[in-house]
Image (spheres, rainbow, N blue to C red):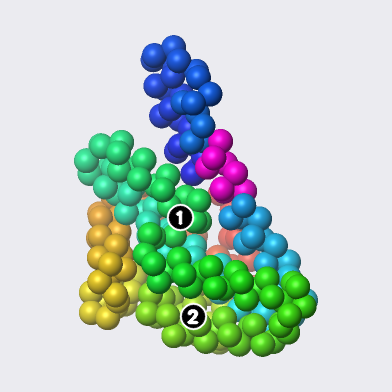
């Protein structure tokens, strides 16, 4: 989707102007390489973590935290576009896509770069999986940009999805305790996206019920993967 977002409007412009020069599509080629690099690192570190449950448990939380922060970035842009119909809102996503769509906030980018380095140290044999697992969990617990409502840093929690029941608590945290820029991004994303999400054209009561039922052990097994 990051690639389509960068490519589609350039293709439409190229068709309109009958100009298919290499220069016009150079940013798409660069983004493709950057996306491959980012995801290669993410998955490579996941494979490294498979050697130890403790490390995998920590790394999947790193992964989930990044996904949550990226999700709010994308939701915010989507909601702004629905409200304004200004394509420039979507073009902004190109600047964050190479970083896994993480928000352009220094402490966030620095933390994830550090986490990747720690996982790399295990792959190179410089640190043990258990040592790095403990470091990653502590790093997430100490970070001031991880919404506590999702329970990502709670070792006992195995379910990180941004469910409707969790959103009010995350919103309160964003307003009261989150760093200013993180809080602003989250509140903007949640409030705008909620208005769009509950619109009849996007909200299905039947689908929401199915999602709830699918999370029930044993009983919900038949609902998982149903369309």
What residue is drawn where x is 45% and y is 15%?
19
User: Mark 2 — residue?
Assistant: 140
Could you tell me which secondary element the residue under label 1 belongs to? Answer: loop
Q: Residues within 10 Å of mark 1 (few under 14, many from 20)?
A: many
Extreme-top residue of the structure: 18
- Whole-percent x and y of residue 201? 33, 43
Q: Would you say residue 136 is visible in this rendering?
A: yes
Q: Is residue 39 above or below residue 201?
A: below
Q: Residues within 10 Å of mark 2 (few under 14, many from 20)?
A: many
What residue is drawn where x is 41% and y is 29%?
9
Report the label total.
2
Q: Name the one closer to the observer, 114 or 196.
A: 114
Mark 1 and mark 2 in contact (Cβ < 8 Å)?
Answer: no
Q: Name the one closer to the observer, 138 or 219.
A: 138
What residue is drawn where x is 69% and y is 87%?
130
Left or right? Give the position of 186 relative to 12.
left
Q: Name the one closer to the observer, 129 or 58.
A: 129
- The numbered mark, 2 or 1, whose residue comes first in the sequence reads 1
Q: Name the one closer to the observer, 183 or 96.
A: 96
Q: Would you say residue 194 is visible in this rendering?
A: no
Left or right? Give the position of 177 relative to 124.
left
**SS assignment for the magenta stretch, majority:** helix
**Which stretch did the figure color magenta?**
29-36
- Whether residue 188 is in magenta: the answer is no
Q: Quadrant of residue 104?
A: bottom left
Could you tell me which secondary element the residue under label 2 belongs to? Answer: helix
Q: Is residue 194 above or below residue 169?
A: above
User: Mark 1 — residue?
Assistant: 101
- Whole-percent x and y of residue 33? 60, 44
- Whether residue 33 is in magenta: the answer is yes
Left or right? Give the position of 5 relative to 62.
left
């Amino acid at each position: 989707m990051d690639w389509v977002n960068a490519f589609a409007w350039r293709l439409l412009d190229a068709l309109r102007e009958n100009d298919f020069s290499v220069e016009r599509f150079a940013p798409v080629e660069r983004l493709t390489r950057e996306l491959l690099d980012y995801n290669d690192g993410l998955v490579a570190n996941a494979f490294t973590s498979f050697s130890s449950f403790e490390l995998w448990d920590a790394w999947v939380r790193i992964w989930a935290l990044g996904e949550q922060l990226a999700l709010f970035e994308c939701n915010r842009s989507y909601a702004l576009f629905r409200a304004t119909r200004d394509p420039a809102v979507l073009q902004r996503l190109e600047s964050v896509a190479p970083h896994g769509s993480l928000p352009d906030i220094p402490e966030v980018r620095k933390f994830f770069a550090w986490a990747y380095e720690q996982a790399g140290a295990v792959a190179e044999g410089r640190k043990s999986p258990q040592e790095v697992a403990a470091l990653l969990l502590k790093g997430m617990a100490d970070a001031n940009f991880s919404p506590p409502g999702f329970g990502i840093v709670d070792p006992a929690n195995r379910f990180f999805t941004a469910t409707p029941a969790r959103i009010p608590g995350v919103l309160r945290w964003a307003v009261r305790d989150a760093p200013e820029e993180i809080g602003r991004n989250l509140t903007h994303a949640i409030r705008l996206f909620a208005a769009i999400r509950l619109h009849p054209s996007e909200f299905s009561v039947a689908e929401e019920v199915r999602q709830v039922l699918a999370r029930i052990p044993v009983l919900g097994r038949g609902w998982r993967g149903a369309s």
